[in-house]
Image: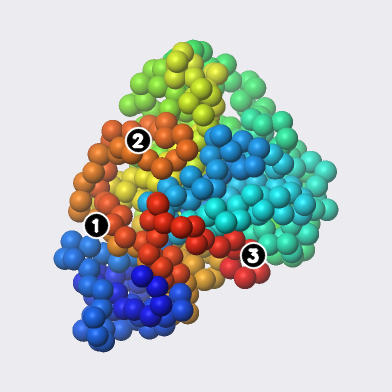
Amino acid sequence: MSGAFVVRARRVVLPGGEQPAAVHVADGVVTAVTGFDDAGDAPVTLAADEALIPGLVDSHVHVNEPGRTEWEGFASATRAAAAGGITTIVDMPLNSIPPTVSVAALHVKREAAAGQVRVDVAFWGGAVPGNADQLQPLLAAGAVGAKCFLLDSGVPEFPPLDDAGLREALTALAAVDGLLIAHCEDGGVITRAPDPVGGSYPAFLASRPGAAEETAIGRLIAAARDTGARVHVVHLADGDALPMLRAARAEGVPITVETCPHYLTFSAEEVPDGDTSFKCCPPIREAAHREALWAALAAGDIDLVVSDHSPCTPELKRLDVGDFGLAWGGIAGLQVALPAVWTGARARGLGLGDVVRWMSAGPAQLAGLPGKGGIVVGRDADLVVFAPDECRRVGHLHHRNPVTPYAGRELTGVVRRTWLRGQLIGPEDAPIGRLLDRARG
């Protein structure tokens, strides 16, 4: 379906709350939001068990094309996104070759994506040693911000920033109100921790202690305070870091923070020894940390929830030997992010409006994509028909390598239909996604 139409539902999640409404669409944008009964002729009327929500925005996706397309490519990643109700993704700058650390590399990335994407795609640039002079040009060329690591990233072509390099990057970004997003674990803390031993998950957890997150976040806060630059903590797993983040925000440091569905769903106590599908960095921590993250989301101390979809080939997960020290660290979860978060939110008395704020409005705001993130007049008609009460066991996934700890898990909430800019999309439909940039959104 494309062109002009109206879709109405008894449950529509709008920025002001959930209510019956009719959403009018023309030329790919929302043109009006009216009462349920003010829908004109032949509206699309959702079933009684369906809700209409805005398309989700996932600002943390590792696509890896070109260079490591066998891990994940634009065709497969955006197919999975469309199936999961995610209508915009923002691609991370590392794991592809070349990494997106220059304008030339950004052009390579965009050329690789062109014609393949089933949802809209924007791009992060990368901040690595020696490229501070590339950060402003990257933003001018359309990158939505810059990503850095504060310890070894796991791939040699994307080295980490030390404190001097971090301040140099932040100074360059602050001059143009640019954003730096940071993987916050401290290499020194991890070097002093015990090495992971074989298939023991407790041993792997001990090798990446919470103190590594807290130390690195402290470094980021100090650098942001000194430079005035906007910063963002990606994939927070350690609940003990929350007090320092609250204090920094109360002080006026421009810092935001995200967490991920796997940290909200799983706990260290339930990870089987040898099941390396659960390995990610920072690691899935104990249930007390999971509950602290949920409480922080409810309180507004965590701003958004994004997948950190970071798959690899099955061979690199080393399921054959179950060795956490050898396996690639990353969770494949793009397609199931919405039901995973909704399952946990619902169990804790939180609503669909909360999930939409964390998974649509928040990431759109972070990435500076004003056409996304809500059912609002003038914004793109990215709409999702969601059945919040239907349960389904995780089975077939559209990721290139569907090795995931979610396999076989029963989750609540099913995506039934998705419109991207007013056009119905599905995993097998032609790719109609656009490549977005910081200027156009």
Q: Mark 2 or mark 1, which is nearer the start of the sequence?
A: 1
Q: Mark 2 or mark 3, which is nearer the start of the sequence?
A: 2
Quarter the C terminus occupies: bottom right
Q: Which amino acid is tagged 2?
A: Tyr
Q: As displayed, is residue 354 above or below residue 328?
A: below
**Residue 94 point in image, percent of width and height:** 65, 41
**Residue 139 point in image, percent of width and height:** 71, 60
Residue at image position (83%, 53%) is 133
What is the secondary structure assignment of the residue under circle 2? loop
Q: Residues within 10 Å of mark 3 (few under 14, many from 20)?
A: many
* Count of number-bearing discs: 3
Residue at image position (57%, 16%) is 195
Q: As displayed, is residue 328 above or below residue 8?
A: above
Residue 438: mark in rendering: 3
How many angstroms separate mark 3 from mark 2 (CA)? Answer: 33 Å
Residue 387: mark in rendering: 1
Q: Residues within 10 Å of mark 1 (few under 14, many from 20)?
A: many
Q: As displayed, is residue 26 above or below residue 393?
A: below
The reply to whether discs 1 and 3 touch (Cβ–Cβ < 8 Å) is no
